[in-house]
């Protein structure tokens, strides 16, 4: 499995747990590889002061098996970016596309979730509106549901924040088998958390549209 992880100004750093899970997975499946992609290669300022380096820009991103779209407070800007929307649509023709947390709002903006079930972040603070409610109101063609993750085949969406770990493990199971995913969870010391998440929130599978 080769994964392209999409970042943008305002990505929440915890969503780069997707990269961390794949890094640990290489101990189980050394053929796993991953890279960061952004509108332009180079420094990308994430939320709250962390800067990362994207290896590739939209114009030169190499092929990958999976595109993982991160979430974070910059999602509104990213979802309104013609360059980002065009890249996701184009790249998804050859790669399965998985959105984590509010990355699901970016994926919804492409139209690729229309007619499908999808989920996104639920838990918020203060006067914030839950992104899952925004998904329902802004994208009525999408069936917004409360789930740990939704797998529609070529497109997948995951719940909020640390559930990006569950999504990445799910992708590992797709490409490398359930045993590899479970062993990765074990060495992450995430087995108990994964079991708890599986018990409290469903994973929904739908036939590819």
Image (cartoon, rainbow, N blue to C red):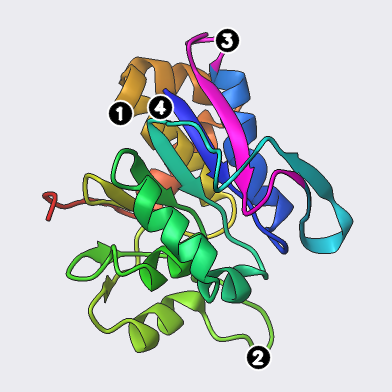
Q: Position of residue 98 (x, y in %)?
A: 40, 48
Q: Residue furthest right?
A: 49
Foreground mark, 1 or 2, reads 1
Give the quarter of the image for residue 99: bottom left
Q: CA distance from mark 4 to mark 3?
A: 13 Å
Are the two marked residues, 1 and 4, in contact with CB atoms closer than 8 angstroms?
yes
Picture layout, residue 26 above or below residue 161: above
Residue tagged by mark 2? 127
- Residue 179 position, x and y percent, is 36, 16
Q: Earlier in the sequence, mark 2 or mark 4?
A: 2
Q: Is residue 159 visible?
A: yes
Mark 1 highlights which residue? Answer: 174
- Would you place residue 64 above or below residue 109 in this image? above
Q: Are marks 1 and 2 in contact (CB under 8 Å)?
A: no
Between 23 and 76, the residue placed more toward the observer is 76
Viewer-nearest residue: 166 or 70: 70
Mark found first going from the N terminus, 4 or 3: 3
Query: Which of the 4 image quadrants contains residue 35?
Result: top right
Query: Magenta part of the protein: which range?
Result: 26-42
For the residues labelled 1 and 2, the Cα–Cα distance comes to 38 Å
Q: Could you classify mark 3 by the number of other residues whose Cα lies within 10 Å: few (under 14), some (14-19), or many (20 or more)?
A: some
Q: Is residue 12 left or right of residue 45?
A: left
Mark 2 residue crowding within 10 angstroms, few (<14) / some (14–19) / many (20+) = few
Determine if residue 102 is in view: no
Disc nearest the viewer among 2 and 3? 3
Q: CA distance from mark 1 to mark 4?
A: 5 Å
Q: Nearer the viewer, residue 166 or 82?
A: 82
The local secondary structure at tag 2 comes to: loop
Residue that label 4 marks: 172
Question: Mark 2 or 4, which is nearer the eye?
Answer: 4
Q: Quadrant of the N terminus?
A: top left
């Amino acid at each position: 499995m080769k994964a392209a992880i999409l970042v943008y100004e305002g990505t929440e750093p915890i969503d780069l747990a997707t990269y961390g899970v794949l890094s640990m997975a290489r101990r189980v499946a050394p053929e796993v590889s991953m890279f960061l992609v952004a509108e332009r290669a180079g420094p990308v300022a994430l939320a709250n002061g962390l800067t990362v380096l994207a290896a590739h820009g939209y114009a030169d991103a190499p092929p990958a098996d999976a595109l993982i779209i991160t979430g974070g407070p910059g999602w509104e800007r990213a979802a309104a970016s013609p360059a980002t929307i065009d890249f996701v649509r184009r790249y998804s023709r050859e790669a399965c596309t998985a959105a984590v947390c509010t990355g699901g709002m970016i994926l919804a903006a492409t139209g690729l979730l229309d007619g499908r079930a999808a989920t996104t972040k639920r838990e918020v603070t203060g006067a914030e509106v839950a992104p899952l409610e925004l998904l329902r109101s802004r994208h009525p063609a999408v069936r917004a549901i409360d789930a740990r993750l939704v797998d529609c085949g070529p497109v997948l969406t995951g719940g909020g924040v640390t559930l990006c770990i569950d999504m990445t493990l799910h992708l590992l199971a797709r490409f490398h088998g359930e045993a590899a995913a479970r062993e990765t969870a074990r060495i992450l010391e995430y087995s108990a958390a994964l079991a708890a998440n599986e018990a409290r929130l469903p994973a929904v599978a739908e036939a590819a549209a």
